Amino acid sequence: MPERELILTLACPDRRGIVYAVARAIAEGGGNIVDSQQFGDPDQSAFFMRVHFADEAGGELSAWQATFAPLAAEFGMRWELRDARRRQRILVAVSREGHCLNDLLYRWRAGAIAGEIVGVASSHPDFEALVAGYGVPYHALPAADATVAERDRALLDLVEHQRVELVVLARYMQILGPDACRALAGRAINIHHSFLPSFKGARPYAQAHARGVKLIGATAHYVTEQLDEGPIIEQEVARVDHAHSVAEMARVGRDVECVALARAVRWHVEHRVLLHGHRTVVFR
């Protein structure tokens, strides 16, 4: 059997000796570091670290947790230790634009996303056949005219029953209510175009075209009660010019949305994203 690999992530007040203490604990516990990344925020005196290491001792996960617990107490760490081989369970929610869903399903099937898509949820049947082709269950949510509370309850019931660890809103054009936002804090990712707040409402690409916009962008972020203002995980841009029609700009927008969302999902399931207040630290 190949040796198990573990991922340690931590955040704490910055001070001397953290990297040394962590590396020493891993070495003395029988681990071998595969890669390590760290970041110190000088403005807030905060320190962040992600360490991927091989467990050559072959002990229980609880033994490693016991190894790191004294360090966490000494340095005031928020920390998590995970088995790198364990695949997070993902639920994708979609409305009537399927480009991000299709892209995620393909990348997942190709092995580019180290998670397990256990279901797709929608108020519309548009992509049921697409999802069935990947062997993924398709779950019907209440119709678009249902209340926010009804839609959220159905979504959260799915999350509970399918033991979902990450919800991906892949152009899910419904607003989550406060209860759902709180229940999914730090484990729901949304994607939207980056014209906000300049071009709100309907037909944003037409508005952008009329103003001669030269950059098309997309933002992937964690969901919060503040609509489209959660901590940003990834952004992508592409240049356009006067020769692009509204339809061509929308096509470019779909492409950058797919790329930004896929990166955000991949980094999340690989435990590369650490929350830092309203920001994120992303170890790529």
Image: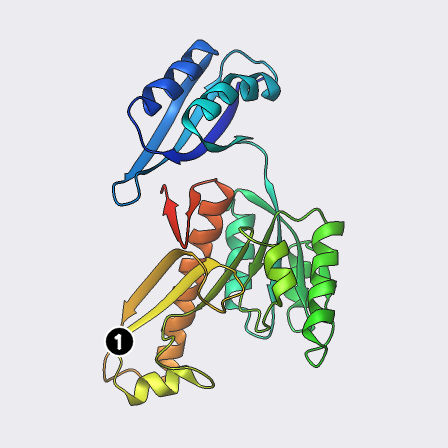
The quarter in which the N terminus is drawn is top right
User: Residue 125 is drawn in which quadrant?
Assistant: bottom right
Q: Position of residue 181 (x, y in %)?
A: 59, 60
Q: Is residue 171 left or right of residue 91?
A: left
Nearer to us in this view, 220 or 45: 45
Instruction: Indicate whether 234 appears above or below 49.
Output: below
Q: Which quadrant, please, contains the C terminus?
A: top left
**Residue 152 in view of the camera:** yes
Which residue bears the numbered disc 1? 240
- The answer to whether 274 appears left or right of 153 in the picture is left
Between residue 141 and residue 156, name the one nearer to us.
156
Q: Is residue 92 above or below residue 8?
A: below
Q: Residue furthest toward the bottom? A: 210
Residue at horizontal 71 percent and vertical 76 percent from the top: 147
Name which residue lies at 48% across and 30% down: 7
Can residue 137 be seen? no
221 lies above or below 253: above
> Hey, which quadrant is residue 32 in on the image?
top left
Please report the residue visible at 29 percent of the width from the left and 82 percent of the height from the top: 244
Q: Dot 1: few (<14), some (14–19), or many (≥20) neighbours within 10 Å?
A: some
Which amino acid is tagged 1? Answer: Val
The residue located at (58%, 71%) in the rendering is 175
193 vs 220: above or below: below
**Residue 255, percent across and down?**
40, 67
275, 53: nearer the viewer? 275
Residue 171: x and y, percent?
53, 69
Q: Which percent across, then down, holds residue 233? A: 41, 54
Name which quarter of the figure residue 26 lies in.
Answer: top left
Looking at the image, residue 273 sits to the left or right of residue 61; the answer is: left
What coloring was used for the rendering?
A: rainbow
- Element type at marker 1? loop
